[in-house]
Image (cartoon, coloured by chain):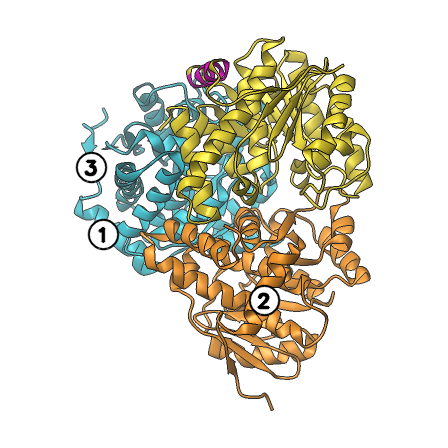
Chain colours: A orange, B cyan, C yellow
Amino acid sequence: MPAHPVFMDYDTPACQAVGQRIRAGAPFVYGLTNYVAAPLSANVLLAVGAAPAIGAAPGWPDGFGARAGAMWVNAAGLINGSVEDMRTAIAAANTAGVPWVLDPVAMGAGVTGYDALIRTLAAGGPAVIRGNASEIMALAGGMGTARGVETTATIAQAVPSGLTLAHRQKAIVAISGPEDHILTPDGQQVVIPGGHRLLATVTGAGCALGGVIAAALAVTPVGPERLMAVATAHALYARAAEMAARNAQGTASFATGFVDALSQLQQVA
Amino acid sequence: MPAHPVFMDYDTPACQAVGQRIRAGAPFVYGLTNYVAAPLSANVLLAVGAAPAIGAAPGWPDGFGARAGAMWVNAAGLINGSVEDMRTAIAAANTAGVPWVLDPVAMGAGVTGYDALIRTLAAGGPAVIRGNASEIMALAGGMGTARGVETTATIAQAVPSGLTLAHRQKAIVAISGPEDHILTPDGQQVVIPGGHRLLATVTGAGCALGGVIAAALAVTPVGPERLMAVATAHALYARAAEMAARNAQGTASFATGFVDALSQLQQVA
Amino acid sequence: MPAHPVFMDYDTPACQAVGQRIRAGAPFVYGLTNYVAAPLSANVLLAVGAAPAIGAAPGWPDGFGARAGAMWVNAAGLINGSVEDMRTAIAAANTAGVPWVLDPVAMGAGVTGYDALIRTLAAGGPAVIRGNASEIMALAGGMGTARGVETTATIAQAVPSGLTLAHRQKAIVAISGPEDHILTPDGQQVVIPGGHRLLATVTGAGCALGGVIAAALAVTPVGPERLMAVATAHALYARAAEMAARNAQGTASFATGFVDALSQLQQVA
């Protein structure tokens, strides 16, 4: 039986500790992601104090997959990269003991061959899988409910799938939505309330979260502390979104305020 | 003989109605575009209330081309995608009755083979062709006058070519510039005055307009109402640019203010 | 023996003259760069008054390499483009007498095959090589000290390597850091102090500088004046960063303020 959910926000001391370790460690985080999300992802990682590199130049998947503190693999990176490069990076990371995050973007949107490629990436053994409700349900084996890159399912609908997926994959599963749920293989649940609906109007914000999770993993030992690392990435995001919403004049100034808030919370700027 | 031009701005009730339908319908709009313009294009579409997906991951051109409410194909997407993927998406869209927009970026800049590829895309039957004066003149068969991705011709020079092109292609042709001209196969002309010169300092703003036109098509039935849909996209752009210019401190805060204004006008933020 | 370094900032009249020529000439600048940096690079070039085009659509490397006023080649462009396209563009530029800038991004980060590709690009004869300390040291033949795309070496450590590289390549070498050093084949040194540490939190800011250097080269005759052209690009950057830091609320509003300041200094907005 899963335990009762634990509610958490950015004020939790354990959360602050993870943020502090990212700031102090400035981890090198390597990402294979898509060109829509890449600029924001790099800026978000710089704002939280990490050192990102993105993309698969010749030799990078093998070299950076092994050298990074952690890695994130965004399935929509297949719009500008090959699944072979992703597999090379995953193999290099696994061999070197580098934890990595899988983001199954647009899984369950009705494109069967694409979904099958994501399943082969998931078989590579990510430490964390993050996505929206539709994506997590599809990767767990449920019906496809995504519309392009957007979810049509609710968090509540996705939690049972997420628990199944976490158990089967032996990975932490994080579902983003109006409140975020972080699930472990043994049925623990951390819930991050808050955040702001405008975050869904910033392209790549979800994708960039995969990078922030990786940054948190990079400064956290293997073991139960990883749950708090993943939760911290979400709590930091939620708090920054709330801060940004206060002064936003629209969706673009919200995006600017969001990255500003991340850099303020992490004392980078 | 072409009819006299009709002048229009965002206050036109028909325009407001199209904006309202985009907001209410949140259409899924699929784009094949270039990585320079992609982040802004996605953010612009989210700001007006649409649901964009961009790029050609395996299976997406066929799957999303058929499932989207509308599609836009930006020729400069050839910097990061294949003409085959574009053709696949076009064929899927045509089979499913999904209207699509062609943007012949940098046509007429002196690169013959590239121009020839765009002609093959135009042969696929876009519902709308949008571009700057040089691009429209080149696609209509005139002399190449583009310098890279910039026009050296005026709107006045391009209107006769645009009318010819609209008639030949049985498509609406939209020419962007200090004032925008929207032309139909039977010679109707709608002129959108206003806007702001700073819009030309925001990379990808023209490319993103192709996406907004697609969003407007997605919520408009086939037939004469499409003229108003295309005009609305331009009128919304012009108004948002005017609003952004009031508080801009430079080209980047203008860009932020422009997207903010789109989201305000569309009541997304 | 190298001469004593000359210190310079944006108030230098020679600097103002280069800025004025960019504004007046609006040079067409062609870039092969990566998708992380591309949107900012294009916006930065538009902000200073240049006319950028980016990417290798079919025929562009040959056509735009020859037609541009100047070109920049960013090695991390290998995440989304082929070395063959880069070589084609370089050959076209060289044949047409178009000066070009090489940015050896992430050279010396431990990926041997990637570093070897950059060496073949350098053999193509760039007019200017720009990078951070680790990259310049690696290209000069020293130990690899980069961590992903970031330097771990200091400017002081890199200057001797930079002088060697400038002499060997018969190129101007520019090293970016807390103060920038511009070095010539005959041992001249110009130092640009100032700038702001937050510039390192804006992804692609260094990459975009390669484009601004190209814009300055495009409006400057071959010969000794090129040193001032390269110095101007750096002095403009340093001044704009200082201006942006005054009102920044975080890393993202710093980025907006930086591009705004470029456009103000160049009287584009």
Could you say which is closer to the camera, residue C93 or residue C48?
A: C48
Disc 2 with disc 1 on a shared chain: no
Chain of residue at mark 2: A
Q: Amino acid at mark 1?
A: Ala
Q: Which residues make up the magenta segment?
A: C14-23
Q: Secondary structure at mark 2?
A: strand
Is B127 displayed left or right of B117 in the figure? left
Q: Which residue is mark 2?
A: A130
Single out the mark in the foreground, 3 or 2. Answer: 2
Please state which amino acid type lies under the numbered disc 2: Arg
Please, which chain is the residue tagged with disc 3 on?
A: B
Dot 3 amino acid type: Met
Measuring 26% from the left and 37% from the top, which residue is drawn there?
B246
Task: Answer few, some or many: residues within 10 Å of disc 2's Cα (few below 14, many 20 plus, some between 14 and 19).
Answer: many
Residue beneath the point at 57% across and 78% down? A161
How far across and how far down the image is residue A148, in percent?
Answer: 50, 59
Quarter of the image where one finds residue A69 = bottom right
Q: Residue furthest front?
A: C4
Does B74 sit left or right of A187 as displayed?
A: left
How far across and how far down the image is residue B258, in percent? 33, 42
Q: Residue at x 46, y 72 (%)?
A: A153
Q: Identify whether B32 is placed above or below C51.
A: below
What is the C-alpha distance between the residues marked 1 and 3?
Answer: 14 Å
User: Does residue C16 show up magenta in the picture?
Assistant: yes
Q: Residues within 10 Å of mark 1 (few under 14, many from 20)?
A: some
Q: Return the residue at label 1.
A: B17
Q: Quadrant of the C terminus of chain C?
A: top left
User: Mark 3 sits on what residue?
Assistant: B8
Q: Evaluate whether residue A144 shows in this view.
A: no
Main secondary structure of the magenta stretch: helix
Of B166 and C103, the residue lying toward us: C103
Q: Residue at x 57, y 49 (%)?
A: A42
